[in-house]
Image (cartoon, rainbow, N blue to C red):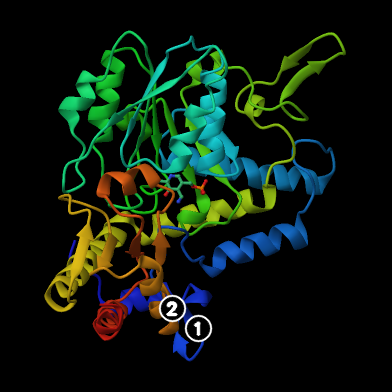
Amino acid sequence: MNTPSENIINSIRAQFPALGISVGKHKLVYLDNTATSQTPQRVVEAIDRAYYNTKANVHRGVHTLSQQMTLLQEEAREKARAFINAPSVQEIIFTRGTTEAINLVASCIGRDWPDGAEVIVTEMEHHSNIVPWQLLSRPGREIKLRVVPTDEHGVLDMNTYRNLFNSNTAMVAATHVSNVLGTVNPVKEIAAEARAHGVPVLIDGAQAISHRAVDVQDIGADFYAFSAHKMYGPTGVGILYGRRDLLEQMPPYQGGGEMVGHVTFQKTTYAELPFKFEAGTPEFTAIAALSQAIDFINETGYDLINAQEEYLLQYTTGQMLKRVPGLRLFGTAPGKDAIISFLIGRAHHYDTGLLLDKLGIAVRTGHHCAQPLMQALGVEGVVRASFAVYNTRAEADYFVDALCRIAPMLQ
Ligand code: PMP
């Protein structure tokens, strides 16, 4: 697809009220989309509608409001299913986010793993795909992480990956897209190798879902996790896709209302999927609004989203390399997503972020919840600018101009 016209991008921007706000004396230039995206009006309005018109607890009432709210929640589940091409709504579990989704899988699937069980992860994992596996260790049972390294561009070493499997391998847990490097990992190949060894695979889709069409069946993922707030949706909602036979074998995650069949003081039976994994009152107002975020992406189209983000990535990277003195880029994998991590000379990432903020530019600084990757890169932290479909070339120019302006102060 050709680069979308300014008019098209402006009509998309118009749907995001927050993009019009000012930060101090400057208009906001929001380049922190990897952390969370901004939200279109239709999503906020859906939350309002849920609060004003249909707020009643789901799945528990015979009354009209409860039934309406339940319908909205279950419509969102069906939308999420179709969005990632999962075979059944029973395989779509609502969580608080990617983090909770991964914790759910780790604690349930890993509950009875033996001492010495191994989980293969990549060097570029977010802490939320590292720590939940480490939490499975306890006195007398050590769970080991085996790590797939990356090369100097941020590309996974797939040969090493293939050689990490052994009779102790219990799980593969890999990110689809790195939140620091922007690398898009070969998740289909990763899943196929895991399947060949009879090992389940979890893909962390937190950074993939807003940029590319995800088909969990085509990928061959046993589990796929993502967060609504990174895909133009509400906060407090995540989705875990899990293969039905694995979910059925797994024990529940938490106990409480909704996840039970029958309870006595002697014994409890559990609800059918997906409710077995959804104890307590879900974030039903936000879940209802998730439908609107999915509609926004479907109506905008991944072709257009990709075309705009790819244009901004290439253009901005080119301009930065040409104009910003002392620039160090982290993550140069072919086909990477629109995430630019960098440092300027010896400047501290925090100082760079602070000066950019003074000019109205929102970027993220620090270790990005990927400290092991920072160790591998030999840095303490980086500055990260990340684009969404609503960012413009004018914003990219303003950003690069700002870097040129502040660079001399930082040397
Ligand atoms: N994985 C990756 C790759 C991420 O970028 C993030 C968010 N930064 C997460 C997991 C965690 O997502 P959440 O905080 O929404 O649970």
Left or right: 94 as drawn, with respect to 14:
right
Would you say the beta carbon of the disc 1 residue lies within 8 angstroms of ligand 1? no
Residue 249 is tagged as none
Q: Nearer the viewer, residue 156 or 104?
A: 156
Image position of 190 with respect to 170: above or below: below
Reading the chain from its start, which is encountered first: label 1 or label 2?
1
Query: Residue at the bottom extreme?
Result: 25
Image position of 89 with respect to 400: above or below: above
Image position of 390 with respect to 405: above or below: above
Instruction: Please state the horizontal and vertical placement of residue 206, each as a whole percent of the image.
Output: 42, 46
Q: Nearer the viewer, residue 364 or 352?
A: 352
Residue 78 in view (yes/no): no
Residue at image point 80% right, 48% down:
56
Q: Which is in the foreground here, disc 1 or disc 2?
A: 2
Per the image, the residue denoted by label 1 is 23
Identify the secondary structure beneath mark 2.
helix
Residue at image point 47% right, 77% down:
19
Corner quadrant of residue 264 = top right
Question: Could you give the CA–CA distance between mark 1 and mark 2, rounded to whole angstroms?
Answer: 8 Å
Residue at image point 15% right, 79% down:
323
- Callouts 1 and 2 close, C-beta under 8 Å: yes
Dot 2 amino acid type = Asp
Dot 1 amino acid type = Val
